[in-house]
Image: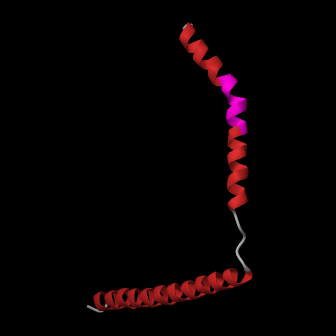
Amino acid sequence: MASVAEQNALTTTIKAWPERIKTFYADIRTEMKKVTAPSLKEVQSTTTVVIITVALFALFFWIIDLGIGRGVDSFFRYFTHR
């Protein structure tokens, strides 16, 4: 059976919930007022950066894959003809 102190702590915690929830939602409202949507120019510039970055990474990995593939192919050819 729970002690009196544990029961009092639980009761205090449960009674504090409504106030904590109100504070939480008030904090959310305050933070959401600070949020701004990006402008069209910002969206276009970041989209361009993402597309260019993805293309460069794709090129990089294609070159690496090609090099490793040819290296493995040469390795197998070397040992299968001996």
Residue 22 as seen in the image, left or right of residue 66: right
Residue 8 as seen in the image, left or right of residue 30: left
Taking the view exactly as shown, the residue that stands out farthest to the left is: 82
Magenta stretch containing residue 23, yes or no?
A: no
Q: Nearer the viewer, residue 63 or 38?
A: 38
Question: Residue 66 at what x, y percent from top left?
Answer: 44, 90
Question: Residue 9 at what x, y percent from top left?
Answer: 58, 18
Question: Residue 76 at what x, y percent from top left?
Answer: 34, 86
Residue 2 visible in this rendered orientation of the protein:
no
Q: Quadrant of the C terminus?
A: bottom left
Q: Is residue 33 above or below residue 72?
A: above
Measuring 73% from the left and 30% from the top, which residue is drawn there? 18
Q: What are the residue bounds of the magenta stretch?
A: 14-22
Q: Nearer the viewer, residue 15 or 3?
A: 15
Measuring 61% from the left and 85% from the top, which residue is drawn there? 51
Q: Please identify the dominant SS of the magenta region.
A: helix
Magenta stretch containing residue 18, yes or no?
A: yes
